[in-house]
């Protein structure tokens, strides 16, 4: 699945200079990550936005938004936004700000302690 390279450039222009932002090809598109956690991505010309489970319904109430059903069933906390929902820089920035704010609240899973074998 290809993605809209012009939209990727628009996202880079807004989020690319932020500390901890990287990108990775995944889901047949491209994902932008903050400290290793996806906050926004592209699949074809749809924006995949990680809004968080607590604000999922709020996001769905906005125009041009639908549940992200990448696997065939909706994923709570993620939405798709069609091009009309991010047509201008202000709208795209708002989605990026929302998703990065949520991802900053997500804790990394605890690291497993390394086990050392003792030789008797």
Image (cartoon, rainbow, N blue to C red):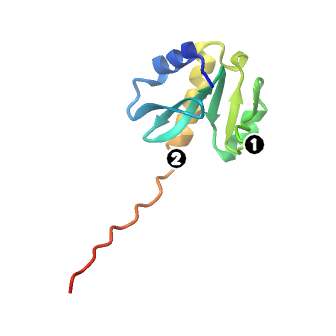
> Around disc 1, counting alpha carbons within 10 Å, would you say few (fewer than 14), some (14 to 19), or many (20 or more)?
few
Residue with the mark numbered 2: 105
Would you say the residues marked 1 and 2 are in contact, meaning their CB atoms lie under 8 Å apart?
no
Report x, y in % for residue 55: 69, 42
Q: CA distance from mark 1 to mark 2?
A: 22 Å
| Residue at x 58% of width, y 30% of height | 41
Q: Is residue 11 above or below residue 119?
A: above
Provide the secondary structure element on which disc 2 rests.
loop
Residue with the mark numbered 1: 74
Circle 1 or circle 2, nearest the eye: 1
| Residue at x 28% of width, y 73% of height | 116
Q: Hey, which residue is sitting farthest left in the picture?
A: 120
Between 46 and 84, the residue placed more toward the observer is: 46
Which quadrant of the figure has residue 49? top right
Q: Is residue 106 above or below residue 46?
A: below
Provide the secondary structure element on which disc 1 rests.
loop
Q: Hey, which residue is sitting farthest bottom in the picture?
A: 120
Report x, y in % for residue 51: 64, 38
Q: Earlier in the sequence, mark 1 or mark 2?
A: 1
Q: In the visual, does 36 lie left or right of 117?
A: right
Which quadrant of the figure has residue 64? top right
| Residue at x 67% of width, y 46% of height | 53
């Amino acid at each position: 699945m290809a993605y809209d390279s012009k939209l990727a450039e628009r996202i880079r222009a807004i989020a690319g200079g932020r500390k901890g932002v990287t990108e990775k090809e995944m889901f047949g598109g491209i994902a932008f990550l903050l400290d290793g956690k996806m906050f926004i991505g592209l699949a074809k010309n749809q924006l995949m936005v990680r809004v968080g489970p607590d604000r999922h319904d709020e996001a769905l109430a906005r125009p041009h938004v639908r549940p992200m059903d990448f696997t065939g069933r909706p994923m709570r906390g993620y939405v798709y936004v069609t091009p009309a929902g991010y047509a201008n820089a202000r709208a795209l920035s708002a989605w990026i700000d929302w998703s990065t704010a949520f991802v900053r609240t997500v804790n990394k899973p605890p690291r497993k302690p390394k086990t050392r074998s003792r030789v008797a």
